[in-house]
Image: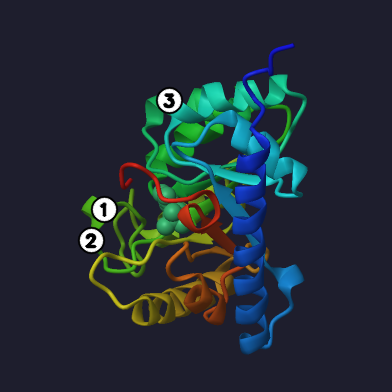
């Protein structure tokens, strides 16, 4: 008998279980330090560059939230995982081109990286025709205001990239559901400073959109600090699955 492609060897399963135990204990400690309950926090396993078998194995370990950042990789992986009879929640966390919206809405349950009114429109149209229920959306915010690196701009009146404009476009879209904000700490910034700034932006955002309380922030290297500043979703790749061959 040969293994189907979406399976892993026992040693890989053990490696993933060990990584998961370490990450879960870091999250538990960070929550304890911040006086928060771990039930408020969702860990998303960022499986980019890793095969479908790892996703299936993680599901077997109870990890049912999975993140990917490139449609070309995620679409076939999601199909392979589904063929193995496993249905995690797929979170799309990478920069997204409008011409990929149709593909992404077919497998993604949540898109974390919406940062323009035009992208919100493309996702709304794709979701209306390609899904039977609304797509959950987090608006990605730029913490340092550098639009070139992605992220809507807090406090900006830019009609396409201003945070308020993007959030309103998502909130008003029939086939999208605004659930919160996402950010990545900018290169060269202390995570402390980045997530403190993000917490301020999130507080203002929640006054306008009280139902959209999700805050997706924190990765392998800085999840403790993100949790201290209110993250509800941490996106963990290397600490869980191992170092990726290329950094992206
Ligand atoms: C790759 C990636 C992560 C995970 O990064 P690690 O440092 O491996 O935990 C989180 N968020 C985004 C947007 C990513 O692209």
Q: Which mark is residue 146?
A: 2
Disc 1, SS: helix
Q: In this view, does 219 lie above or below 78?
A: below
Q: Which mark is residue 149?
A: 1
Q: Residue at x 73, y 27 (%)?
A: 132
Q: Residue at x 76, y 69 (%)?
A: 39
Is 197 left, or right, of 21 in this rendering? left
**Callout 1: few (<14), some (14-19), or many (20+) C-alpha neighbours within 10 Å?**
few
Distance of label 3 from label 2 (alpha carbons): 26 Å
Place of residue 141 in the rendered image (x, y in percent of width and height, measured from the top left): 40, 61
Residue located farthest toward the top when viewing the structure as drawn? 1
Number of residue marks: 3
Distance of label 1 from label 2 (alpha carbons): 6 Å
Is 133 left, or right, of 156 in this rendering? right
Is 134 left, or right, of 104 in this rendering? right
Q: Which of 205 and 239 is in front in this view?
A: 239
Q: Which of 8 and 26 is in front in this view?
A: 8
Q: Which residue is drawn at 62% across and 31% down?
A: 53
Q: Residue 72 carries which label?
A: 3
């Amino acid at each position: 008998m040969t293994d189907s492609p979406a399976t892993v060897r026992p040693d890989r399963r053990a490696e993933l279980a060990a990584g998961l135990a370490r990450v879960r204990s870091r999250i538990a400690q960070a929550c304890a330090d911040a006086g928060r309950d771990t039930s408020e926090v969702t860990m998303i396993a960022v499986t980019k560059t890793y095969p479908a078998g790892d996703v299936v194995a993680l599901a077997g370990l109870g990890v049912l939230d999975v993140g990917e950042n490139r449609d070309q990789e995620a679409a076939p992986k999601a199909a392979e995982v589904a063929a193995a009879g496993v249905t995690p929640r797929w979170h799309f966390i990478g920069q997204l081109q409008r011409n990929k919206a149709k593909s992404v809405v077919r497998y993604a349950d949540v898109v974390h990286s919406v940062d323009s009114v035009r992208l919100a429109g493309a996702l709304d149209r794709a979701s209306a025709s390609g899904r039977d229920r609304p797509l959950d959306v987090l608006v990605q915010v730029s913490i340092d205001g550098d639009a070139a690196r992605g992220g809507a701009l807090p406090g900006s009146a830019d009609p396409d990239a201003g945070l308020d404009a993007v959030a309103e476009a998502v909130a008003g879209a029939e086939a999208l559901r605004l659930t919160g904000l996402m950010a990545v700490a900018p290169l060269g910034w202390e995570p402390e400073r980045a997530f403190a700034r993000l917490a301020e932006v999130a507080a203002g955002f929640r006054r306008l959109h009280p139902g959209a309380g999700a805050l997706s922030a924190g990765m392998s290297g800085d999840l403790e600090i993100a949790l201290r500043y209110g993250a509800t979703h941490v996106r963990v790749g290397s600490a869980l699955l191992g170092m990726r061959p290329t950094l992206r």
